[in-house]
Structure formats: C-alpha cells, structure tokens
Amino acid sequence: MADSNITKHALSQALKELLLTQNLEKISVGNICEKCGMNRKSFYYHFRDKYDLVNWIYYTDFLTIIKKDETLIHFELLETICTYFYDNRLFYQKTFIVEGQNSFTEYFSDIIKSIVSEDISPYIPQDMNPEPFSQFYADAIVCAIKKWIYQKDCMSPQNFTKFLKQCIHIAIATQDFESEG
C-alpha cells in the first residue's frame, strides 16, 4: 500500500473512532489529526475537509465491495449499497445528519441518480428530459435510505431493497405522461 493510502486509511480510522462518541459536526480536522498523530498539513494534503474524507471512506470502502462482483446490475447494486449501510449503520447515521454542500448526502445522491437513471430511462418518453425524473427518484431513494438507517429495528437490506424496487416500479407504471392543455 502506498504511503498516501496508509495516511488516508489512518485518517479514516481516526474519524470512524471519533464518530463512536461524537457527531460529525463536533469533530474538527484537528481532532482527527490528533487522534492519529498527524499534523493538519498532512490532512489537507489528502483531503479538502472532513466531508471529503467521509466521501473518500464511502468510495473506497464501497468500491472494494463492488469490485468483488463487477457483474452487479442496478437493483442488485442498490441492495449491495443498502447492505453496506446496514453493516456500517453507526457511521452513516452520523454522516447522513450533515446536509448541504460537500455533504455525504449530496455525494450519495449523485451516485444513486446515476444508478436510477439507467433503470427508469426505458419508461420516460423520448421527447422528455429524463434528468428531472432521475433526480426525483434519487432524492426519494436517498430520503428513504436515511429514514431506514435511522430506525432502531430497521428491516433487512434485502427486504428494504425489495420495497424500494416495488415503490419505483409502481410509481413508474402509474405515471401519466400526457401533456396539459
């Protein structure tokens, strides 16, 4: 493992440990650096801010899972994502709280949007822009995942993914694309 990755992993582990006892908003870059014995300059060499670190954690942790089975298709990928969140609930309960620019929610929404756009594109009339539909479903899925992950006794990732798939298919199947006028 390159020195850069060793440093990034040390910073990510420090953040994960701090999140066991604190909310993300209360954790500073200084806290993260102190926890792993690094200076702030090292942190900023690798990450813009703590939110960039959170996104990197998701990307690298999740990408490792995805690379194990690159044949996954869209709803299978969504189930893999939900399983990952389920297995890492505490971390994502704390990171999903933060909203706004550079937040994990914003980053994750973009990922979901790209997955959903391919699934819904066959159902969108060719003369309509699919972008707003993809964004709508991405927002709905992200919101549903966040609510699900915060539940004390949330359903299994498999059942939750099945529920999401049913909701999307029902919504798409019942859409009326007739124009007004």
Image (spheres, grey):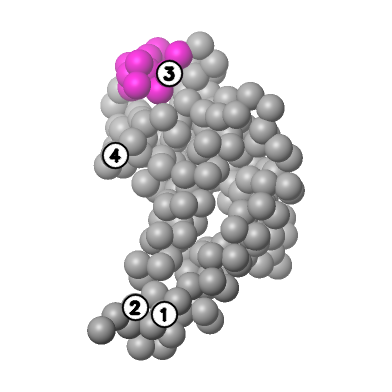
- Disc nearer the start of the sequence (4/2): 4
- What is the magenta range? 22-36
Q: Is residue 98 left or right of residue 164?
A: left
Q: Secondary structure at mark 1?
A: loop
- Disc nearer the start of the sequence (3/2): 3
- Disc nearer the start of the sequence (4/1): 4
- Residue kind at label 4, given as amino acid type: Gly
Q: Look at discs 1 and 2 and give the one toward the viewer.
A: 1
- Residue 47 in view, yes or no: no
Q: Is residue 66 magenta?
A: no
Q: Secondary structure at mark 3?
A: loop
- Disc nearer the start of the sequence (4/3): 3
Q: Look at discs 4 and 2 and give the one toward the viewer.
A: 2
User: Separation of disc 4 and disc 3 at Cα?
Assistant: 16 Å
Closer to the camera in the image, 23 or 47: 23
| Residue at the (68%, 27%) spot, across then down | 153
Residue matched to label 4: 100
Disc number for residue 23: 3
Residue 133, position as x, y percentages in the image: 40, 68
